[in-house]
Image (spheres, rainbow, N blue to C red):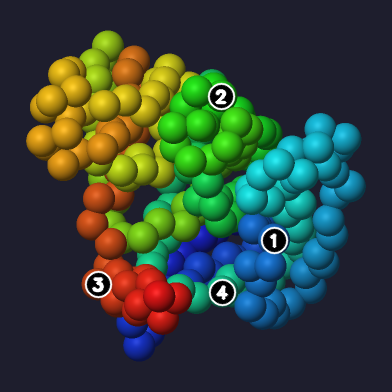
Amino acid sequence: MATFKVESSEGMRWVRVDLDDDRMRAERGALNHMLGAITMDVPLPTLKAWWVSLFSDESVVRPRYSGSGTVYLDSTLGGYHIMKLAAGERWVLDTRCFWASDGDVKLSIHREPMVTAFWAGEGLLWYKTALKGEGQVVLSVDGPVHEMELNDDTLVTDGPFVVARTQGISMQIKRPAKSLLSHWLSGQKRAYVYKGTGKLILCTVPYWRARMQRDRAGWNSE
């Protein structure tokens, strides 16, 4: 299998992938440079993938790299998390969270319910990347993450802090307070509610440089 490593310098982080007669897949446009006998190809998307691309910001065209050598992906002020997929698990990633994976990991499309998509501000069609298989996956995240498990339990967050979840956990968007009066007075307009049994990867605190970059971009746009 490919070897993934997160490297850093000057506050920036990037992913290094070492291939030894292996193959891997990365997000579209993620390549920075590569060294060695490595070839890149892009599999022709299915009709379903092309259809999804018309209604989603989630990339459906992801290049593959095969051979022997080293691939360096683009750097960011945010971070990356390397996770291992076990056989039989199916993970659903948040939008624009996928960054790279082993060649044996299978990628597919997951669609959230229309009601959830509407209240999340994603229109009526909200597509995400789903993963299945055995191998390593690199997630693009805003800061440090931690994994937690739910056992027929509920997790409520103020925003989309869950970057990945297993298939046994559903997501809904609801009012955090039961009554309308409490809803108005609480200052919490909506909450992300996760229910079920399975695993979650949570990212609640961004790296400070990434937060400053985001805030500055917001100021410049005003």
Residue 19 falls in which quadrant of the image? Answer: bottom right
Q: Which residue is mark 3?
A: 208
Which corner quadrant holds the C terminus?
bottom left
16 displayed left or right of 187: right
12 displayed left or right of 190: right
Q: Which residue is mark 1?
A: 28
Q: Secondary structure at mark 2?
A: helix
Three-letter amino acid code at disc 3? Trp
- The disc, 4 or 1, on the residue closer to the chain's N-terminal end is 1
- The disc, 3 or 2, on the residue closer to the chain's N-terminal end is 2
| Dot 2 crowding, Cα within 10 Å, few <14, some 14–19, many 20+ | some
Q: Which residue is mark 2?
A: 114
Between disc 3 and disc 2, the foreground one is 2
Three-letter amino acid code at disc 1? Arg
What whole-number distance in Å separates the C-alpha atoms at marks 3 and 2? 34 Å
| Dot 1 crowding, Cα within 10 Å, few <14, some 14–19, many 20+ | some
What whole-number distance in Å separates the C-alpha atoms at marks 4 and 3? 19 Å
- The circle on residue 74 is 4
- The disc, 4 or 3, on the residue closer to the chain's N-terminal end is 4
From this viewpoint, is residue 104 visible? no
Q: Residue furthest top?
A: 152
Q: Is residue 128 above or below residue 182?
A: below
Q: Secondary structure at mark 1?
A: loop
| Dot 4 crowding, Cα within 10 Å, few <14, some 14–19, many 20+ | some
Q: Residue sitting at 27 percent across and 11 percent down? A: 152
Q: Residue sitting at 66 percent across and 71 percent down? A: 31
Residue 122 in percent (x, y) is at 54, 40
Residue 55 falls in which quadrant of the image? Answer: top right
Three-letter amino acid code at disc 4? Asp
Tell me whether circle 3 and circle 1 mark residues in contact (CB < 8 Å).
no
Q: Residue furthest bottom?
A: 10
